[in-house]
Image (spheres, grey):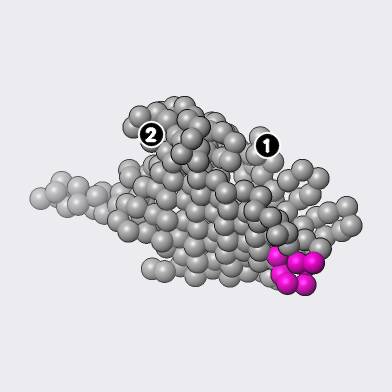
Amino acid sequence: MKIFKIFIILIILASRANALTPYNAQYDLYADTSMGNFKIGVAEFRLETDGNKYIYTSEASTKSMWSALYKFSRFEQSIGTNSYNELVSRKYTVKEILGENAEKNITIDFFPEKNYATYNNNEKWKVSPGNLVDELSVYLALSQDINNDLIAKEFIYQVGSEEKVKFQTFIVEENEMINISDEMIETILVTCPELNLTLNLSKKHSYLPVLINKINKKNTFRIVLKSIDFQT
């Protein structure tokens, strides 16, 4: 009887570790340019789940006062599955508008069982066995994996991006206290040199990013958490 009870408890714990909690988060968008640091817009991250399926969406845009100088909007969406603590991306979409022009309109479909992905239903890329995420869902993968393994020093994922599918290494650098909206928050600093990406993942927020730094050509963009609502 005791063994049976222990078995039931282990199943419950495993299912909790395997679950992604839906949430909605608001961020401020900053740009570090040669002219200085400016708050140029807002971003929203939204996670929806249905069983082991997830839809993860991010939307970013410049404020109207900046539109005359730098009108920008970006939509990303990742659709995939989460089974046995492993995220598998099935579809990744990117739409980006700069000024009045559509700069990007990309869809990557992943077929991991057949070891390939398609780019805009045309070009075919090879996919290797192993964790398969994209540039958006990797935030969820890191959150889940750090929650389950706080002593790991690096995490390796096969990441689908706008240009290729490639294994990327995310390095756990150190614990770091940072100030967000006049509140000191305990975070884990994670970097991915190849993607020019630095993340501060907050213990208080289930190790989701509260600060994202991304270098894009000559500019550095920062996304800073403003509010987050977990839908438990």
Coordinates of residue 48 in the picture (x, y in percent): 41, 61
Residue 83 relative to residue 74: left or right: left
Say if 224 sits above or below 78 in the image.
below
Q: Secondary structure at mark 1?
A: helix
Quarter occupied by the C terminus: bottom left
Indicate the amino acid at tag 1. Answer: Pro
Report, in whole angstroms, how far the alpha carbon at label 2 lies from the one at label 1: 26 Å
Q: Residue at x 76, y 50 (%)?
A: 220
- Asked if one can make out residue 26 in the rendered structure from this viewpoint, the answer is yes
Q: Nearer the viewer, residue 175 or 71?
A: 71
Q: Is residue 65 highlighted in magenta?
A: yes
Crowding at dot 2, Cα within 10 Å, few <14 / some 14-19 / many 20+, comes out as some
Q: Residue at x 62, y 57 (%)?
A: 74
Indicate the amino acid at tag 2. Answer: Pro
User: Where is mark 2, residue-wise?
Assistant: 112
Q: Secondary structure at mark 2?
A: helix
Residues at discs 2 and 1 in contact (Cβ within 8 Å): no
Q: Nearer the viewer, residue 215 or 143?
A: 215
User: Where is mark 1, residue-wise?
Assistant: 193
> Which stretch is magenta?
62-68
Q: Nearer the viewer, residue 142 or 58?
A: 58
Residue 203 relative to residue 11: left or right: right
